[in-house]
Image: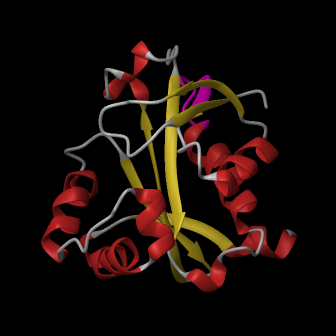
Amino acid sequence: MQMQNQMIGFRRLSLEDMPNMHKWLTTDSEVKRTWGYAHQGTYEEVISEFVGNVSGEELTEPYLILYGDTPIGYIQTFKWADYPGYDQYVDLTDAASLDLFIGEEVYRNKGLGTVILSRFLREYVFADPHVARCIINPEVNNSAAIQLYEKLGFHIIGTFQDIPGEPGPVHFMSIEREN
């Protein structure tokens, strides 16, 4: 585990990373299922989804997940206060969130998810002193992700069937800074 921890890193997403993002989001069935892509998005559609984050015009902070120097996936964080409307479901005061996927299949099921999330929570999400907790909302049928989140200390604080913009029922899960 220590070796894996040393190999995992993050760097800001750039426009030069769009070929990888397009490949992962449109050709990998696992990423398409969990990221909500049910179509063959064009390269331009992928760029339009991420260009605001890359430029800083959008408030979501985008990062590549690196294994050594190799890009293996994507992770992002944002403050819930910047995206109003979800607070009608659960209390999102002082909360941030994150989303991720491992786009390179050979790096899945190797125990990297725990390392990736632990480091990202510590080094990015909770590095902001104004963030008291991280609240995520995985689809209820994404059992592998839910098990990973629970292993790290996240717990379910609510389950909702019909949230606009979400592909299906979701659990809201939370972890406090102290954990």
Residue 132 counted in the magenta span: yes
Residue drawn at (52%, 36%) of the image: 170
Q: Left or right: where does residue 178 sit relative to residue 88?
A: right
Residue drawn at (18%, 76%) of the image: 43
* Foreground residue among 84 and 120: 84
Q: Quadrant of the C terminus?
A: top right
Count of number-bearing discs: 0
Residue drawn at (69%, 57%) of the image: 144
Q: In the figure, residue 41 lies in which quadrant?
A: bottom left
Q: Left or right: where does residue 14 sit relative to residue 159?
A: left
**Residue 162, above or below 33:** above
* Image position, residue 126 (x, y; %): 61, 36
* Image position, residue 150 (x, y; %): 76, 42
Residue drawn at (72%, 73%) of the image: 109
The overriding secondary structure of the stretch rendered in magenta is loop
Please give the range of residues in magenta. 126-134
